[in-house]
Amino acid sequence: MKNLEREEIRDIKPYVPGKPVNDVKREYNLDKVIKLASNENPIGASPKVIEVISKNLNSFNIYPDGYCYDLRKKLSEIHNFNMNNFCFGDGSNEILGMLTQSFVNHGDEVIYCSPSFVEYNRLSKIMGATPIQINMAKDMKFDLNKILDKINDKTKMIFICNPNNPTGTIVTKKEVGEFIEKVPKNIIVVFDEAYFEFAIINKKYPDSLEYQRKGYNNIVTLRTFSKAYGLAALRVGYAIADKEIIDALEKVRYPFNVSTLAQLAALTALDDYEHVKKSVEIVIEGKNYIYSEFDKMNIEYIKTDSNFLLFKTEKLAKEVFDNLLKRGIIIRPMGEKLLRVSFGTMEENICFVENLKEVLK
Ligand SMILES: Cc1ncc(COP(=O)(O)O)c(C=O)c1O
């Protein structure tokens, strides 16, 4: 049974998620664990979502609507795009995979900056393509000029993570406007906007849908219900793009990929934008608190337009991460001395800061 797997995937490392709460409870014999590792919503889903789900528990025997009609209709009204400009996924991660499966050939090149969402690398390699990782610009944001420099005949797809995970930085309206004009129209530019709702309060943040409305039909916009809407466990994300791109995605989409409850939850969540606003406010409060504490502690960090923060410690990240785990706090090591923390409730943020002070002593 040795060496049966495709050569392309032989050296690929499986995706490593943030450590689950129950693993840490078990391993360290702890009753209470705080997870600030996966950029989740600390106040959970809207109460309206919880109510609607609890009233719809009698539908498990029937397959979901694979077309996601109600959700599609509602989103098409919200965004003012045609219903056939949407494709739905089991989280936006699934759509990233559908994009590479539909468009990226063996030998193609896929460009993005690094550090960014690790899936761009893994999904490109699965297709036998070459990921071209470009260093971030000095201010730790995507270097769109360097991306333009790397474009050649083999380039098939460009990923722009905006805001970028894990740096939290954005590329601006002006930068994107200049960039998109110069990208050849046979290259697909994917704007991964998983953290859109946190960034939109920054006036410089570009909404990539605007460029689609202007006629750039090589753009894909990705959004998710996992972050600001608090539905990470239910798994719903979507793409908005030109119909030709959507038709290709539909060819590789698994049937019934978004569950009935997930569709219902997303539909209901769209009716409670107050909950999203409240979630964003909590994130901003947490951000201001951690900025001010980190300033006092002389910890270097990158200003973020998202619900997480990348910071640097003098001690090794692995050591800081392990010592916080023992104290029941899960964050994410991101490099030799870099760590990422998601903003939690104020109580969680205070607990994180107090424990970090101890760990860094
Ligand atoms: C930048 C980015 N894109 C996409 C995703 C995937 O999210 P989901 O599949 O839950 O929609 C994540 C998750 O952390 C992310 O950080």
Image (cartoon, rainbow, N blue to C red):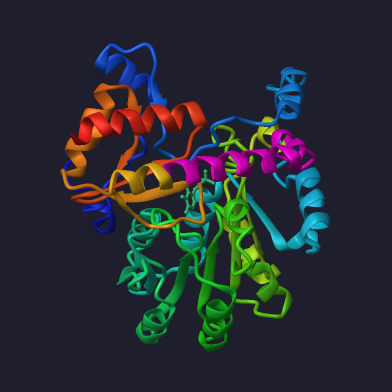
Q: Is residue 257 visible?
A: no
Q: Residue at x 56, y 58 (%)?
A: 193
Image position of 42 (left or right of 240): left
Where the N terminus falls, by quadrant? top left
Q: Is residue 270 visible?
A: yes
Image position of 184 (left or right of 296): right
Question: Which secondary structure is most common in the magenta stretch?
Answer: helix
Q: Residue at x 33, y 45 (%)?
A: 296
Image position of 62 (left or right of 224): right
Where the C terminus falls, by quadrant? top left
Question: Residue 324 sits in which quadrant?
Answer: top left
Which residue is more in the foreground, 122 or 118?
Answer: 118
| Location of residue 17 in the rendering, given as x and y in whole percent from the top left corner | 36, 39
Instruction: Look at the image and give the residue range highlighted in magenta.
Output: 264-290
Image position of 100 (left or right of 77): left
Q: Is residue 268 magenta?
A: yes
Which residue is more in the foreground, 43 or 221?
Answer: 43
| Location of residue 54 in the rendering, given as x and y in whole percent from the top left corner | 72, 18
Which residue is more in the foreground, 66 or 112?
Answer: 112
Which residue is more in the foreground, 111 or 270?
Answer: 270
Q: Residue at x 50, y 49 (%)?
A: 93
Q: Residue at x 70, y 68 (%)?
A: 243
| Location of residue 25 in the rendering, given as x and y in whole percent from the top left corner | 33, 16
Report the number of discs.
Answer: 0
Q: Is residue 159 above or below residue 3?
A: below
Q: Is residue 263 magenta?
A: no
| Location of residue 106 in the rendering, given as x and y in whole percent from the top left corner | 35, 69
Q: Is residue 29 above or below residue 281?
A: above
Q: Is residue 58 above or below residue 211?
A: above
